[in-house]
Image (spheres, rainbow, N blue to C red):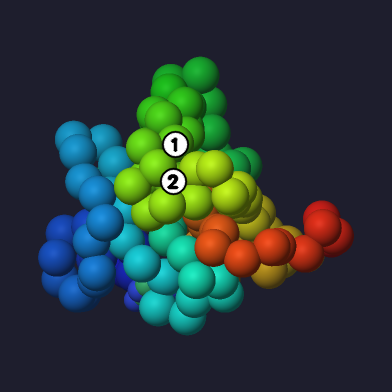
Amino acid sequence: MDCIFCKIISGEIPSKKVYEDESVYAFYDINPMAPVHVLIVPKTHIASINELTPENSAVVAHIYEVAAKLAKELGVAESGYRMVSNCGADAGQTVFHLHFHLLGGRPLKVDMC
Ligand code: AMP
Ligand code: ZN
């Protein structure tokens, strides 16, 4: 499949890995928008939030558990951070493999949109 994040997960495209387990992969965003900017993705190809179903959605809860662990390790658990998943054109989604941006390390804009 021609998916950049599937290629990162398989190692075909290099990345700066932060965490990996049987169902999740996390790596530094190539174009960081904050001092801490990590992408957390399911290893299974799911195009976006729109593709979540009762059969595949458990990984999202696991991604949030991983986010809590990484936030502690990266030193932003107490200062604060934001998890963002863009879905579709109006949200500016550019990679169609479900991913969550973990952003922190400075005060983030309060605007949600
Ligand atoms: P989104 O715009 O929500 O779809 O986010 C896609 C994110 O993937 C952007 O923040 C990009 O900077 C990031 N990105 C694209 N290609 C790579 C790559 N090869 N390694 C790391 N991050 C990437
Ligand atoms: Zn993919």
Q: What secondary structure is found at the residue carrying circle 1?
A: helix
Residue type marked 1: Ala
Q: Kindly identify the residue that appears in the image at 19 percent across and 39 percent down.
A: 21
Q: What secondary structure is found at the residue carrying circle 2?
A: helix
- For residue 112, side relative to residue 61 (left or right): right
In x, y percent, where is residue 63?
Answer: 42, 36
- Asked if the beta carbon under badge 1 is closer than 8 A to the nearest atom of ligand 1, the reply is no
In x, y percent, where is residue 72?
Answer: 40, 42
- For residue 3, side relative to residue 86 (left or right): left
Residue 7 visible in the snapshot: yes
- Residue 84 numbered tag: none
Find disc 2 in the rendering and name its residue.
71
> What is the residue that sits farthest to the top in this orientation?
54
Quadrant (top left, top right, bottom left, bottom right) of the C terminus? bottom right
Residue type marked 2: Ala
In x, y percent, where is residue 106?
Answer: 61, 65
Cβ–Cβ under 8 Å for marks 2 and 1 = yes
Find disc 1 in the rendering and name its residue.
68
Alpha-carbon span between mark 2 and mark 1: 5 Å
30 or 88: nearer the viewer: 30
> What is the residue that sits farthest to the bottom in this orientation?
31
Q: In which quarter of the view is residue 30 placed?
A: bottom left
Q: Is residue 81 above or below residue 104?
A: above
In x, y percent, where is residue 56?
Answer: 42, 27
- For residue 94, side relative to residue 59 (left or right): right
Residue 46 visible in the snapshot: no
Counting every numbered tag in the picture gives 2
Q: Kindly identify the residue that appears in the image at 15 percent across and 71 percent down.
A: 12
Q: Kindly identify the residue that appears in the image at 36 percent across and 37 percent down.
A: 69
37 or 41: nearer the viewer: 37
Q: Residues within 10 Å of mark 2 (few under 14, many from 20)?
A: many
